[in-house]
Amino acid sequence: MRNLMSVREKSWLTSELPASFVVFLVALPLCMGIAIASGVPPARGIVTGIVGGLIVSAFSGSPLLVSGPAAGLAVIVAELVQEYGIEMLGPILMLAGLLQFLAGIFKTGQLFRAMSPAVIYGMLAGIGVLIFASQFHVMLDDKPRTHGIDNLIAIPNAIYKALFPMDGSVHHIAALIGITTIITLILWEKFKPRSLKLIPGALIAVITATTIATVYKLPIDYVDVPSNLLEAIQLPSLNSLSRLTHASVLVEALAIAFIASAESLLSAVAVDRLHTGPRTDFDRELTAQGFGNMLCGFLGALPMTGVIVRSSVNVEAGAKTRLSTMLHGLWLLILVIAAPSLLQMIPISSLAAILVYTGYKLIEVEHIRKLRKYGRFPLVIFFATLVGIVTTELLTGVLIGIVLTAVLLIYKMSNLNIQIIRDEENQRMDIYLEGAATFVKLPKLANILEQTAPGTELHIHLDKLAYIDHSCLDLFSTWAKQQEQMGSSLIVQWDGLVERNRKIYTPGRSQEAV
């Protein structure tokens, strides 16, 4: 027994404890940076990180998934704060969390995995563009515009102000700190020593920028963190809770719940591929995320999701249990209580630069290459989702992608190309079907069969057919029985369809008379 306790203690010290420190170092700058990008005080992002680590990780459905504020929700939160005020963030998040919690209770976790990759990739790219555009201005100690497209249009003017500062502005100084942060981050990720591979580049970049700003006492904006963490907490008021009945507020809550759930569960799927331990319980994870967001809403913090970047670092650092994710929340809590003055030394432009780089990384060219393999329509869905998010809003862009995916599905399920080749001399007719043979095309198929001359040997080729339903099979069978007395016969070529649907049709059957 004593040996077993020794082994467990050694395992905890060599895996969970080091991994928790690494995740903490990755999460710290991101918690504050995402809060700034969301238009709220940095301390609220840290509160979300603490709740995600200490509470949600304790009973989540994915033990190695790290929860905290996510860049994917920064855009929608920033719009929410601008439109309704920061006092409504908490109540809306409480409602969104409740929706997630109920979705988990009613076992709908698996449904969120059914989204088209084209929509997911388009959503990530759209979020990346918006984060890049808004944080580019913050990186220059300038204020971001209200809408994403306005931020993009204003980038040349922001660059001009940084290159040619006027009226004593410090945009050029903030820009130098931001550029230094990005260069340090890229160089560290590319050339970091193997022995220090677990030290995150974002942390090194922030330390470098902070050191320079402190040594030279640069007159730029710095992180504003209260000396008492309780000052960052904003409990919901009765007036703000009463506004939850407004239709527009309900839509905002639904959007946060949907996007947070999709991002969390997709991240859980990705984490499952990185380790061989217990698989994710999606309904339990959704319930845990919902409870966490209700608590974050009650405290007035940011919404949380499961985050793939921090989770992959957690796995790579050697974590085996949920203890590492819980401890990273504890380290966040200890730091913000014991040493808030250290956080106040960090330049805002440095954190914004990390998010500029994060936004750029979300626009994955590799995703476009993957989608291209499946034809043009997935690319149309991808770019329509991306453009919709950038030009309108996040939820509208995602809905555009979902609608186009449904249109594609309907098209594929109803599209059927029919080619007929007649051989009058041998009384043979070949019908080649391509697409999907469903009840929608039943009248067209029936019309072709009715015009077939008696005594014809009819061959139906299914090698290019993606799907055939029972109604069409029944039509062929009924026609064959009716025409048998008139000397007609029907032969179905099953080869290609059998090859693609081995679990549905019996392998090895090449021809069958119906």
Image (cartoon, helix red, strand yellow):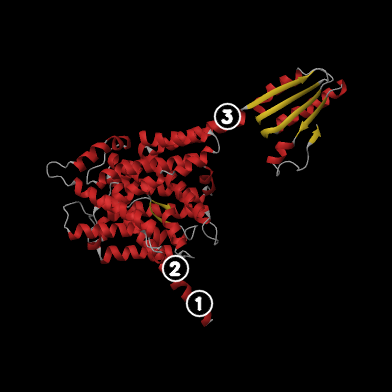
Task: Say which residue appears at 52% left-offset and 42% top-offset.
Answer: 370
* Amino acid at pointer 2: Glu
- SS category of the residue bearing label 2: helix
Give the answer, above or below, for where 513 lies relative to 338. above
Query: In terms of sequence position, does the residue under pointer 1 or pointer 2 come before the other?
Result: 1
Residue placed at 32% from the left, 63% from the top? 333
Vertical comparison of 74 with 380: above or below: below
Instruction: Measuring from the top left, give residue 13's x and y in whole percent.
Output: 43, 73
Which residue is the site of mark 3?
411
Secondary structure type for disc 1 = helix
Q: How would you rate the neighbour count of disc 3 (Cα within 10 Å): few for under 14, some for 14-19, many for 20 or more?
A: few
Q: Earlier in the sequence, mark 1 or mark 3?
A: 1
Task: Please provide percent x and percent y for residue 392.
Answer: 36, 34
Expressed as whole percent of the image width and height from the top left, the position of residue 63 reads 48, 61
Q: CA distance from mark 1 to mark 3?
A: 59 Å
- Mark 3: which amino acid? Tyr
Question: For the residue carrying disc 1, how many other residues have a C-alpha within 10 Å: few (<14), some (14-19), or many (20+)?
Answer: few
> What label sits on residue 383 in the rendered view?
none
Q: Position of residue 177 (x, y in %)?
A: 24, 52
* Residue wearing tag 2: 16
Say whether residue 210 is left or right of residue 15: left
Quadrant of the image containing the C terminus:
top right
Q: Which residue is mark 1?
A: 7
- Amino acid type at circle 1 is Val
Q: Quadrant of residue 154?
A: top left
